[in-house]
Amino acid sequence: MPGSRQLVLTVDQSGRGDHRRIQDAIDAAPANDDSAGSVVIRIKPGVYREKVVVDKPCITLVGTSASSTVITWNESWVAAESPTVSVLASDFIAKRLTFQNTFGTSGPAVAMRVAGDRAAFYGCRFVSFQDTLLDDTGRHYYRGCYIEGGTDFVFGNGKALFDKCHLRSTSLVGGAFTAHKRSSELEDTGFSFVGCKLTGLGVGTSILGRPWGPYSRVVVALSYMSSTVRPEGWDDWSDPAKQRTAFYGQYQCYGEGSKTDGRVAWSHDLSQAEAAPFITKVWVGGQEWLR
């Protein structure tokens, strides 16, 4: 991360901090460049009903606990400004926070959009129904996070590693955990889930993913899959041509939903060598930027 100096700001709804709103703290932070230090914004427990846009690099948001520190909004996804929280700048970190969109089940509603490079999330919760987490562009790392939704609830064209995360499908029929967008072989993007838990409300309600873009790429490794995961595992989104270009694989998963004998023929049961590029922090270049 650039710089070594650190400015600490406190957000407290009771007025005992530097700011009452999270956005006010971000707006008050210096506009960083490579010579500046990082800004840590400590957020006291509370339900913060506000939209947040992180448009400066080297910002860290730290909650007390994800269950007690909640950023929430209620809006369908109709514009770039619709998500509850949008991270547009690089070198962002979030710890112990819940990002929520309470719009419901009638359409897409993004809780978090990550569109900056080198973003890391630790012990966070992402909660909505359709299109919960827009992992849009850049390299991202999620560790020990909880992500909830029913349809395409991890989506976008980012390059992300989900490490020991819990994905919970709330779909009762026709659900999908992911919809990765990669639209060309030249794009070095994809989602990798390692040591994760994939669970849900019902039996056989959700597929692991479907291709938003023709070269969609998702790997699930060393993870537990409950019976929520449908036997076929993946879907071509009614476009058989995408079967030739999408890359969907799993490696050494376990649980009722992990059985590979019913998987679509065009998905991959990976060998150790095939899985290796996807299952460490090297996947997102993390050895260079993760602290």
Image: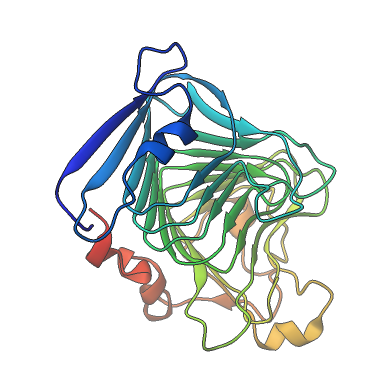
Note whether residue 97 is visible.
no
Q: Quadrant of the N terminus?
A: bottom left
In x, y percent, where is residue 103? 76, 37
Give the residue at the far left of this rendering.
4
Image quadrant of residue 230?
Answer: bottom right
* Closest to the observer, 275 or 132: 132
Count of labels shown?
0
* Closest to the observer, 270 or 209: 209
Q: With respect to residue 24, does 14 lie above or below?
A: above
Image quadrant of residue 57?
Answer: bottom left
x 53%, y 27%: residue: 70
x 72%, y 43%: residue: 129
Q: With respect to residue 221, does 52 lie above or below?
A: above
Give the left or right position of residue 260, taking residue 118 as reference: right
Q: How is the image coloured?
A: rainbow
Give the left or right position of residue 171, taking residue 22 as reference: right
x 75%, y 45%: residue: 203
Q: With respect to residue 284, does 90 lie above or below?
A: above
In x, y percent, where is residue 168? 62, 43
Note whether residue 35 is visible.
yes
x 25%, y 46%: residue: 38
Image quadrant of residue 3?
Answer: bottom left
Q: With respect to residue 227, does 157 lie above or below?
A: below
In x, y percent, where is residue 9? 30, 30
In x, y percent, where is residue 17? 35, 18
